[in-house]
Amino acid sequence: MKEKVELINKSIGAALLISLGNYALLKLGNPIGPIIFAFGLLGVCYMGQNLFTGKCGFLIQDKIKPLDLALILLINLISGYLFGLIYSMTDLEVKTNAIAKVATWAIDIPFFIKSVLCGIIMYIAVFMYKKGTPLGIIYGIPLFIFCGFQHCIANIITLGIAQTFDVSIIICILGNFLGSLFMWYISKNKQS
């Protein structure tokens, strides 16, 4: 029971850190917003928090229980959306920017591919952190944002800020998961 409580707390903590980065992105825009967003994943990694997109590629390698990963995702989504709702009440500009961003999402192949590519970058960023360097995070996070790749936890936060819901989040979750696992698969022999 204590382990589940810790898992839940660390999943809320991860959503909070990513929400701060996402808020900065929506507030500041390019070019500074994507750079500041990296603060979120740096905090997640250095503080040992549970972020779905940082864990899913390590499902097999780190022997993460599938139900624990599902719980991390669920808590990231719920708390991320709630943090977004809170932010929506603090800044009309950020809410307007979130609404405009959600309007660009589509349920199509390009959106799915952008989600897969984000998953690949997230795996590489966390992998590099585990190898002792934050450079994967410092460069990887702005890279996926500048390229318009889709991150499911950032997207759920944006949906909360916009006070709406969009089923594209399901495609984004699947794409992030498959991208991370794909990167793990093609790099696993190199890691051995």
Image: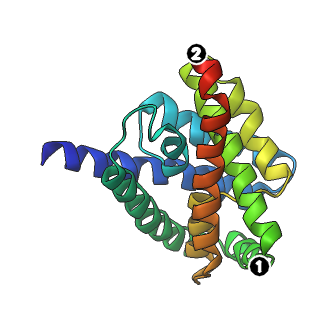
The numbered mark, 2 or 1, whose residue comes first in the sequence reads 1
Quarter of the rendering occupied by the C terminus: top right
Residue visible at 73% across and 66% down in the picture: 112
Residue visible at 60% across and 74% down in the picture: 159
**In the image, residue 164 above or below residue 135:** below
The 10 Å Cα crowd at callout 2, few under 14, some 14 to 19, many 20 or more, is: few
Scheme of image coloration: rainbow
Q: Secondary structure at mark 1?
A: loop
Note whether residue 137 is visible.
Answer: yes
Report the Cα–Cα distance between label 2 and label 1: 37 Å
Residue 57 on image: x %, y %: 54, 42
Using residue 64 as the reference point, say whether residue 177 is left or right of it: right
* Residue holding disc 1: 106
Give the image quarter of residue 92: bottom right
Residue 155 on image: x %, y %: 63, 65
Q: Are marks 2 and 1 in contact (CB under 8 Å)?
A: no
The mark found on residue 184 in the picture is none
Disc 2 residue type?
Gly
Using residue 129 as the reference point, say whether residue 76 is left or right of it: left
**In the image, residue 32 above or below residue 88:** above
Residue visible at 77% across and 48% down in the picture: 144
Disc 1 residue type?
Ala
- Frontmost residue, 92 versus 180: 180
The mark found on residue 132 in the picture is 2
Give the image quarter of residue 150: bottom right
Residue 55 on image: x %, y %: 48, 42
- Frontmost residue, 180 versus 118: 180
Residue 161 on image: x %, y %: 59, 73
Residue visible at 56% across and 59% down in the picture: 153
- Frontmost residue, 144 versus 94: 144
The 10 Å Cα crowd at callout 1, few under 14, some 14 to 19, many 20 or more, is: some
Using residue 67 as the reference point, say whether residue 110 is left or right of it: right
